[in-house]
Amino acid sequence: MLKELKYLLFLFVISLFFFLSLKYYSSDDNKKNSFRSYKQIDKRINEFSQKVILLKSDTIDIVEYVEKTINKNKKNYNFWKLINNNE
């Protein structure tokens, strides 16, 4: 008998926990506070984005192209041709 009462009490406590949690998260006060916090976050992001310092790009002409004709004596190897020649 005591064991059944203990299980019933556990079941009641778990059910009460879920009920109160759902009630709190679906309440109007919680929804209002969450929307306020979203607006605050958006406002902070906008303020911070206006204060951010933009750096000038220094990547213009960063790539230097090298011509292939610098070393004419070097033999050009092609990977697939090397594999085919060994078979």
Image (spheres, grey):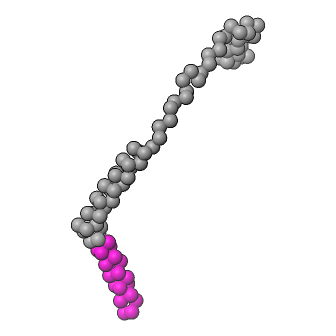
**Residue at the left extreme, as displayed:** 28
**Residue at the bottom extreme, as displayed:** 1
Relative to 40, 27 lies left or right:
left
Relative to 81, 62 lies left or right:
left
| Among the 4 quarters of the image, the one containing residue 17 | bottom left
Residue at 35 percent across and 85 percent down: it is 9
Residue at 62 percent across and 19 percent down: it is 64
Q: Nearer the viewer, residue 31 or 56?
A: 56
- The range drawn in magenta is 1-21
| Among the 4 quarters of the image, the one containing residue 41 | bottom left
Return the x and y of residue 4 as percentages of the image width and height.
Answer: 36, 88
Residue at 73 percent across and 16 percent down: it is 86
Return the x and y of residue 15 as percentages of the image width and height.
Answer: 32, 77
Relative to 47, 59 lies left or right:
right
Q: Nearer the viewer, residue 82 or 27?
A: 27
5 lies above or below 57: below
Tell me if residue 7 can be seen.
Answer: yes
Return the x and y of residue 44 as percentages of the image width and height.
Answer: 38, 52
